[in-house]
Image: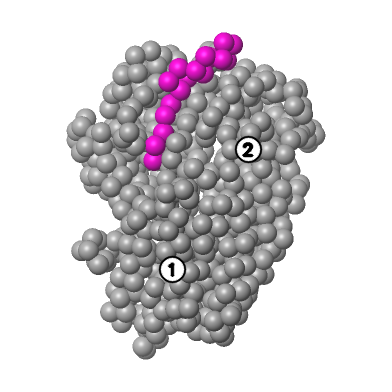
Amino acid sequence: MYDIERYLNIRSAFGASFAPDGTLSFRMDATGTPQVWTLTEPGEWPEQRTFFDERVTFASWSPERQELAFGMDEGGNERQQLFRLDADGQVTNWTDTDAKHRWGGWSHDGDRFAFASNRRDESVFDVYVQDRGATGDAAEMIYKGDGWLSVAGWSPSDDRLLVHEAHTSFDHDVHVLNIESGEMTHLTDHSDEEIRYSSLSWAPEGDALYCCTDLDADTLYLARLDVETGELETVETGGGEREGARTSSDPSDGKWNLDGIALDDETGRLVYSRNVDGYTDLTVGELAGPTDIEEYPDPDIPDGVSGGVAFDADADRFAITVTADTVNTNVYVVDIETGEAERWTHASTAGIPEESFLEAELGHYESFDGREIPGFLSLPHEVPEGGAPTIVDIHGGPESQRRPSFSPTKQYFLAHGYAVFEPNVRGSTGYGREYTHLDDVEKRMDSVADIEAAADWLADRSEVDADRLIAKGGSYGGFMVLAALTEYPDLWAAGIDVVGIANFVTFLENTGSWRRHLREAEYGSLAEDRELLEEMSPINNIEAIEAPLFVLHGANDPRVPVGEAEQIAEEAAEQGVPVRKLVFEDEGHGLTKLENRIEANEAIVEFLNEHV
């Protein structure tokens, strides 16, 4: 039996990138926060390359030089700055400004890089290009934006940029920006219908791009978009079987989201993924024509969740991050033509035997309207008579999905006799456009009703102690915890709210201005839906709460400001509810520093031991 600190010392290695000479970089949290490490051979002792107290948010090698770009914010404030790490270890701060910077990639010659930033106006993003040797405010703004823009990559000839624009989480547009003239060409003009375009990649000839979209379909599929005509052609659908039945060119036939593609724009080699009930199904191949793919053998990697594909210089291999319920996160390198995979990183399991980790069972339960809700149930090794105390762990977003990936805290609770249930309530991604919109605005509380149905379903199982159900969640999942405790107070023995929304009005008033419009599309607008937002806010139903409540937050949270935690903790305590509040001064939207995660989770364990 290991304590929570031991489990939190299980490491993760992820976010790989290949250098021109084949050196592999990745991020690993061995020091307590993710830093850049490198390897030249699989399984060798890695070399640490960055040494900061703050987390490194991405790392990307130059295509031509032994130097890499990386990002870092401060105290979780999400105001990412961009840096260059040279071969000799010297670090150059490229963007020393108090703004957000969203990496847009290297040019093919490695002389320049692109990014989007809100340094001119906090509420919108402009597009910039900067020479690798320039610093400070030397970047050239080549397009003045009026919304949420990000750069998706340089054209093969380095004269154009792909620009992605998000109006809402499910309504996107794609543009091509001419770097020299600043002319922006809109490729995806559409009416009021919401359409997603994601995972954008240039075709080798530069005359088209490949992307995932749900135009005229409920689920995402792989498409080719001609940059001259705007014509869009289906390449692959989401299929209907776990193994990926690719039987039709009609995008409406796809049951699952084809949700990611990585394409090497020199060789045409590619990797794309289907999200099949939360599990990743990968296809590796090479373009044999505009919409034809010659497939290679499936990669030999663990069955779970994988992504973050990075090709080496010749696209003979690719690195990929892999995780599963019983496999902590690590980087594998796959031979394109054979599918043979080799694990390059060996992030520590802190001496905890891998065979002790437990796998979740995918199940479905019926909600109030007859809809089937998917979820993952994990049971401890031994279930006591009368059932185990059970944590209902609700994901954030809500545009997100709980998937079978490794969680050290879940494995701790399983090892100590708790069961864990992770539902994907309506509004979750991964199950099509219709499902994601079932909780919008006035339908918000239907997703909370899915939690009541989950509790009822669990209560009917002999492995679960219905008198010891715990609601736990972060961000939007924190709202779900508070709403479950106030709407269905008799069901819960305790609640754990991590960076959650207590009051939709104050949340929308105080969240970062760059994201307010996107959040209003999901929850409702302050101008038109204030009464509804007030009605749905748990803070305004606080008198109903009965279960002990633990509230955790980061003081620097730019998404859900810390005032949400302060008001719910104060008002619940005034109702006589046992409340504990824990705020971390050097964290933002979630906890990233090891010492803080240890303190938080030790406190959660103490809280549950006391009240459950």
* Colour basis: one colour
Q: Quadrant of the N terminus?
A: bottom right
What amino acid is found at the position of numbered circle 1 in the picture? Ala
Residue 408 in view: no
Which residue lies at the image location 53% right of the left edge and 85% below the top edge? 611
Which residue lies at the image location 48% right of the left edge and 69% below the top edge? 540
Give the structural element (helix, strand or loop) at label 1.
helix
Q: Which residue is mark 1?
A: 483
Estimate the x, y position of residue 602 in percent, counting from the top left.
Answer: 63, 74
Estimate the x, y position of residue 538 in percent, counting from the top left.
Answer: 47, 68
What amino acid is found at the position of numbered circle 2 in the picture? Glu
Estimate the x, y position of residue 271 in percent, counting from the top left.
Answer: 41, 34
- Between 575 and 51, the one lying in front of the other is 575
Figure disc tally: 2
Q: CA distance from mark 2 to mark 1?
A: 31 Å
Residue 185 lies in the magenta-colored region: yes
Image: 496 above or below 86:
below
Label disc, if present, on residue 122 of the rendered structure:
2
Image: 53 above or below 2:
above
Residue 287 lies in the magenta-colored region: no
Which residue lies at the image location 44% right of the left edge and 36% below the top edge? 167
Main secondary structure of the magenta stretch: strand
Q: State the extent of the magenta-drawn residues as a range.
A: 170-186
Mark 2 surroundings within 10 Å by alpha-carbon count, few (fewer than 14), some (14 through 19), many (20 or more): some
Give the structural element (helix, strand or loop) at label 2.
loop
Relative placement, left or right, of 42 versus 197 is: right
Estimate the x, y position of residue 102 in percent, counting from the top left.
Answer: 60, 35
The quadrant in which residue 251 appears is: top left
Mark 1 surroundings within 10 Å by alpha-carbon count, few (fewer than 14), some (14 through 19), many (20 or more): many
**Which residue appears farthest toward the top when viewing the image?**
181
The quadrant in which residue 49 appears is: top right
